[in-house]
Image (spheres, rainbow, N blue to C red):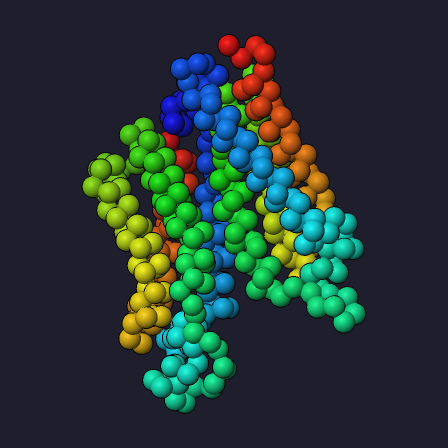
Amino acid sequence: MLADHSFLRLPVYFYCLFSCAQLLSGAVLFYKKIGFESPAVLEYYQGSENMRKIYPDEPDRFIQPKTLSGMIKVQLGHFLFFAFNGFFLVHIIRSLMPGAALPEWMKRPRVIDFATWVYFTGALFDIASGFLVRYGPGLFAGFRILAFFWFVLSGFLLAVFLLYVLWKS
Amino acid sequence: MKFLVTGSIRSDRGPRLIVSLTLVGFFLFFLAYWLREFDAMGFWPGRMIESVRGIGAEEGRSAILMLEDLHVDLLSHSVLLLFLVSLLFQLPTSLFWKKFLTWASFLSCFAYILGRAGIVLSPAFAYLAFGSSLTSMIVYLVLFLIAFRYLLGSDAR
């Protein structure tokens, strides 16, 4: 589609840039609101009291545990973005790949299928890990951080790869 | 999504109804968004600065809240502009105006979202936010008007 209608490349370029900016702002928000350390993640979801049972040396900031309805409210927008963003980026990449000047191994369907699985698995883990930390054992706090970086990096790489494919096609 | 390139959105067999109704939904979002912005932030730079940085005993908005707004708006506007600009491709306007409107819409929107958040760092960003909000609103209105006119105009058959 985009190969024959060069005008549509422009909004796709912009969308990729907006997507990267959004992932970056999400990373900053995660750092500022939650933090990249297990005690901080545990405190954010389970509250200060539960956190200090596992990490008694940490200061008590009197934070209350997150409620289920509050967590679902936050995830509503994330469900929409994760799904739409993944669909759009992969769909455009797939449509441009055949005509792009890329190495043959990159054009194999299994490569983009693998990238698709990595992205959507990262998205699922990112959402699920929050609930696991809140309602499961404290050890899921580390998994929450891992899942977050997994999703952000996979989304960023997908957007950058689309920019690269656009440039090469 | 072939209708985006086949030019069939106005035909009876094309997705004219769904595209028109989607456009109505997006237009309602556009109206609600700017009404909310004017209510929360104000229209003039001075009012924007007061609402973000506070005045006297009145507290402003935290950097985290401004960053959250930025985070949400990047998604909503990127999707909306992607749809509108894709429709623009099919409209009977010159390529120059299509590219101009595409650049103007994305850049003004991005400038407003960043400028509004930047007020936390410096009041000078309020002037960027003010100018880009005006530009963004005008460009959005132009995009909606020409899309509606094309889809629903009397020569649509």
- At 57% from the left and 64% from the top, the residue drawn is B64
Residue B134, given in percent of the width and then of the height, sits at: 71, 40
Rendering quarter of residue A146: bottom left
Rendering quarter of residue A53: bottom left
Residue A6, given in percent of the width and then of the height, sits at: 45, 26
**In the displayed structure, would residue A27 be above or below residue B10?**
below
Please state if A102 lies on the left or on the right of B103 as rendered: left
**In the displayed structure, would residue B49 be above or below residue B89?**
below
Q: Nearer the viewer, residue B92 or A140?
A: A140
Q: Nearer the viewer, residue A124 or A65?
A: A65
Please state if B45 lies on the left or on the right of B63 as rendered: right
State whether residue A59 appears in this view: yes
Please state if A10 lies on the left or on the right of A148 as rendered: right
- At 46% from the left and 76% from the top, the residue drawn is A64
- At 45% from the left and 26% from the top, the residue drawn is B18
State whether residue B111 appears in this view: no
- At 74% from the left and 58% from the top, the residue drawn is B49
Q: Nearer the viewer, residue B43 or B157?
A: B157
